[in-house]
Image: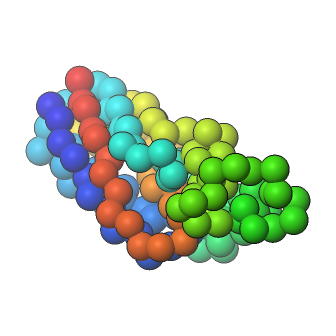
Amino acid sequence: MQTEFIISTRGPGLYEFTRDVCNWLNSVQADGLLTLFVRHTSCSLVIQENADPEVQTDMNAFFQRLVPPSNHPSMSYLRHTYEGPDDMPAHIKAALLPVSLTVPVANGRPVLGTWQGIYVFEHRSQPHTRKVAAHFA
């Protein structure tokens, strides 16, 4: 079984789509493995806490500080800058973080911890429409 999730982002941050995944898998009622793959080079996929929104805020702040925009003095070595100061740093963040996830599924439900959610981690400043390919077997 395959599908595609469309996630609209409004700038840097984590965008949860666990409920969309659960709704899709609910029709399966089977055991297996779910593979998710984001089809972009400037965002990532992560499983992260979904109880306290400060976790998502802090994650975003950490990666903004770890890899600042290309117009920051510490990033003056970057050459790929024609798509804006957030583009090459977004590629670096996507190289540091996963772009695919594998999640076990039991009886049509992802086997996630109590406070875990599935997120697209947007690294670009402008809004984007992100596509996440899903495969269940």
**Where's residue 58, x and y in %?**
71, 68
**Where's residue 47, x and y in %?**
53, 48
Q: How is the image coloured?
A: rainbow
Q: Is residue 5 left or right of residue 73?
A: left
Q: Is residue 73 above or below residue 33?
A: below
Q: Is residue 119 above or below residue 69?
A: above
Is 60 in front, or is 56? 60
Q: Is residue 45 above or below residue 15?
A: above
Q: Which residue: 59% across, 73% down? A: 53
Work out which residue is located at the far left of the displayed protein and give it.
27
Residue 134, quarter of the rendered image: top left
Q: Is residue 78 left or right of residue 114?
A: right
**Residue 61 appears anywhere in the view:** yes
Residue 37, quarter of the rendered image: top left
Count of marks, rendered view? 0
Q: Which residue: 24% across, 30% down? A: 136
Q: Which residue: 57% across, 60% down? A: 82
Quadrant of the image containing the C terminus: top left
**Where's residue 76, x and y in %?**
82, 57
Residue 38, quarter of the rendered image: top left
Is 67 in front, or is 113? 67
Q: Which residue: 71% across, 65% down? A: 69
Work out which residue is located at the far right of the displayed protein and give it.
74
Q: Is residue 37 left or right of residue 134?
A: right
**Residue 114 appears anywhere in the view:** no
**Where's residue 91, x and y in %?**
59, 48
Quadrant of the image containing the N terminus: top left
